[in-house]
Image (cartoon, rainbow, N blue to C red):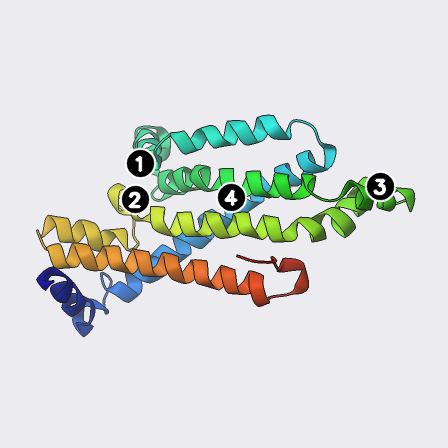
């Protein structure tokens, strides 16, 4: 229990919250990195999933290919990217590695959501003379939105937990607190950094869960 008590003392020390290396600054860096990677991942995965789901062609192959990325450790991808010319561009390798990590749940959930829309609803829309784009926008997307947001929720939580690898490439974020703790042989600091990441991931999960439970009707899921 002494380690946990020391970690709590480290967390509650005001001196550790201020400055460029303080918790507040590292937390901001972590959140910015997570949001940027999540947005890029959504811009890549969601349009592909929606189009393939609407057409009903090639989706299974795309999902399987994207899921292959789950078998490759994100850290291994980051190391390989650091050895390429991309390694010269600051946070570039980290962003690419995290985006590749976040794409599979986004692509899978969005595709399954679109394909799961009742075919009767789609056929009714077509019978009313709606174009493919109008059907996607007016029927398929609204009905698939809870499933799509579930994918976004999963990706966001995974990114929060995995963004600590940015510290290994010289980037910012809460991972820097953990690596600094290892360098100083400070177990309380390492534990404190790990607790911060875990708490942040749980908070992100809770925010998405509440949004899906009590948010707009189109975003709700029946039960979590």
Label 3 Cα crowd, 10 Å radius (few <14 / some 14-19 / many 20+): few
Q: Confirm or deny contact between disc 2 and disc 1 (CB under 8 A).
A: yes
Q: CA distance from mark 3 to mark 4?
A: 31 Å
Q: Secondary structure at mark 3?
A: helix
Residue 100 point in image, percent of width and height: 45, 37
Q: Is residue 88 above or below residue 210?
A: above
Q: CA distance from mark 1 to mark 4?
A: 18 Å
Of residues 126 and 16, the one nearer the viewer is 126
Q: Confirm or deny contact between disc 4 and disc 2 (CB under 8 A).
A: no
Of residues 45 and 222, the one nearer the viewer is 222
Residue 22 point in image, percent of width and height: 23, 64
Please name the residue shown 19% across and 56% down the image: 191
Q: Confirm or deny contact between disc 3 and disc 4 (CB under 8 A).
A: no
Residue 8 point in image, percent of width and height: 18, 67
Query: Mark 4 or mark 3, which is nearer the start of the sequence?
Result: 4
Q: CA distance from mark 3 to mark 1?
A: 45 Å
What residue is disc 4 on?
A: 41
Q: CA distance from mark 2 to mark 1?
A: 7 Å
Kindly indicate the quadrant of the structure image that contains residue 10.
bottom left
Kindly indicate the quadrant of the structure image that contains residue 28.
bottom left
- Rendered image: mark on residue 123: 3
Q: Secondary structure at mark 4?
A: helix
Q: Secondary structure at mark 2?
A: helix
Q: Quadrant of the N terminus?
A: bottom left
Q: CA distance from mark 2 to mark 3?
A: 47 Å
How many numbered badges does the structure rendering display? 4
- Rendered image: mark on residue 75: 1
Q: Secondary structure at mark 1?
A: helix
Q: CA distance from mark 4 to mark 2?
A: 17 Å
Residue 44 visible here: no
Single out the residue that lies furthest toward the right.
Answer: 128
- Rendered image: mark on residue 165: 2
């Amino acid at each position: 229990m002494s380690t946990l008590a020391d970690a709590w003392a480290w967390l509650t020390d005001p001196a550790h919250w201020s400055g460029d290396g303080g918790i507040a600054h590292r937390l901001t860096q972590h959140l910015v990195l997570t949001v940027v990677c999540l947005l890029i991942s959504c811009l890549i995965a969601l349009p592909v999933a929606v189009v393939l789901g609407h057409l009903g062609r090639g989706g299974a192959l795309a999902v399987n290919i994207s899921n292959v990325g789950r078998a490759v450790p994100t850290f291994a991808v980051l190391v390989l990217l650091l050895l390429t010319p991309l390694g010269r561009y600051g946070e570039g390798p980290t962003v690419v590695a995290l985006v590749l990590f976040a794409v599979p749940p986004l692509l899978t959930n969005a595709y399954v959501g679109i394909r799961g829309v009742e075919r009767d609803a789609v056929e009714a829309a077509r019978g009313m003379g709606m174009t493919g784009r109008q059907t996607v926008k007016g029927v398929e997307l609204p009905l698939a939105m809870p499933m799509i947001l579930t994918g976004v929720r999963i990706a966001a939580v995974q990114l929060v937990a995995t963004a600590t690898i940015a510290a290994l490439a010289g980037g910012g974020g809460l991972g820097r607190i953990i690596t600094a703790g290892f360098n100083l042989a400070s177990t309380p600091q390492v534990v404190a950094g790990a607790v911060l990441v875990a708490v942040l991931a749980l908070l992100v999960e809770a925010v998405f869960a509440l949004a899906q439970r009590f948010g707009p009707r189109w975003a709700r899921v029946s039960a979590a």
